[in-house]
Each structure stands twice: as C-alpha cells, then as structure tokens.
Image (cartoon, helix red, strand yellow):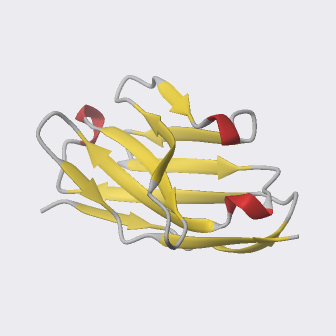
C-alpha cells in the first residue's frame, strides 16, 4: 500500500521561504518519478516540479529560479524548497509518486502566502 505523507505547510509572508517534504512508503522509491503539484479551489491541479529517480528535474515556468525539488532515495523522501514566495503561490500542495503503472497522491498541505 502506497503512502505519501507530506509535512505541514503554513502561513508565510511574501518573500519568505518554506520547505515541504514528502515521505513515501510502500514503493521502490528510486524507481518512481516524484512530483509536487498545487491546486487552488476551482482550478485544475498543476505541476509545480518533478524529479526522476535519476535526478532529472522540471519546473513550472512560474516557479523557475525560486523553487528547488530534490530527493533523498536513502530516506524515501522528496523535498520542495520554496524561496521568494509570492501570494500567487498560495495553494494546496500535493505530493505525487508515479511510474508507468501507477500514480499515487498525498493528502495535500496548505501553503498560504500573505502580501
């Protein structure tokens, strides 16, 4: 059974930083692409960043240069370092694990950025 457990988000001011983590269990972690997505109420869930088992990364244009995704395969954990946060980054953030056969989601964590 796949479990993805995200760290708590929080309320921060614009310009501040926050790091999210997601601990995975029930999967061969290194074989999965791990991603962070976000969703505002009434909007579609969108990719923020993802990282392959080999460390290849991609980012949404809106977060390039501000966010960094990383993973620790020994700890089965993926991280999202968010710097220079903006009010537009306010959303529920979801961890995702996927390979060719399956996709699993965490429960989501709220990040709110005040101006």
In the image, taking residue 39 as reference, residue 11 lies left or right, namely: right
In the depicted view, which residue is nearer to us: 56 or 49?
49
Residue under the point 44% across and 33% down: 51
Q: Residue at x 80, y 58 (%)?
A: 86
Residue 91 x %, y %: 59, 67
Quarter residue 73 falls in: top left
Residue at 38% across, 58% down: 23
Q: Where residue 114 sits in the image (x, y, percent)?
A: 82, 73
In the image, residue 101 above or below residue 22: above
The C terminus: image quadrant: bottom right
The image quadrant that residue 25 belongs to is: bottom left
Which residue: 51% across, 72% down?
Answer: 109
Q: Is residue 113 left or right of residue 47?
A: right
Up the image or down, 84 lies above or below 107; here it is above
User: In front: 40, or 110?
Assistant: 40
Q: Quadrant of the N terminus?
A: bottom left
Q: To which quarter of the image does residue 17 belong? A: bottom right
In percent of width and height, residue 47 lies at 48, 45
Marks counted in the figure total 0
Residue 33 lies left or right of residue 42; in this view the side is: left
Percent coordinates x, y for residue 22 in the rendering: 43, 58
Residue 89 lies left or right of residue 54; in this view the side is right
Residue at the far front in the pictured view: 42
The residue nearer to you, when weighing 58 against 80, is 58
């Amino acid at each position: 059974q796949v479990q993805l457990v995200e760290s708590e988000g929080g309320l921060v001011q614009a310009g501040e930083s926050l790091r999210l983590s997601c601990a995975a269990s029930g999967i061969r972690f290194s074989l999965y692409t791990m991603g962070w997505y976000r969703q505002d109420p009434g909007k579609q869930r969108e990719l923020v960043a993802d990282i392959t088992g080999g460390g290849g990364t991609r980012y949404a244009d809106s977060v390039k240069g501000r966010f960094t995704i990383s993973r620790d395969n020994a700890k089965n954990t993926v991280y999202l370092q968010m710097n220079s946060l903006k009010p537009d980054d306010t959303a529920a953030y979801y961890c995702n694990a996927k390979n060719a056969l399956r996709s699993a989601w965490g429960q989501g964590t709220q990040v709110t950025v005040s101006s």
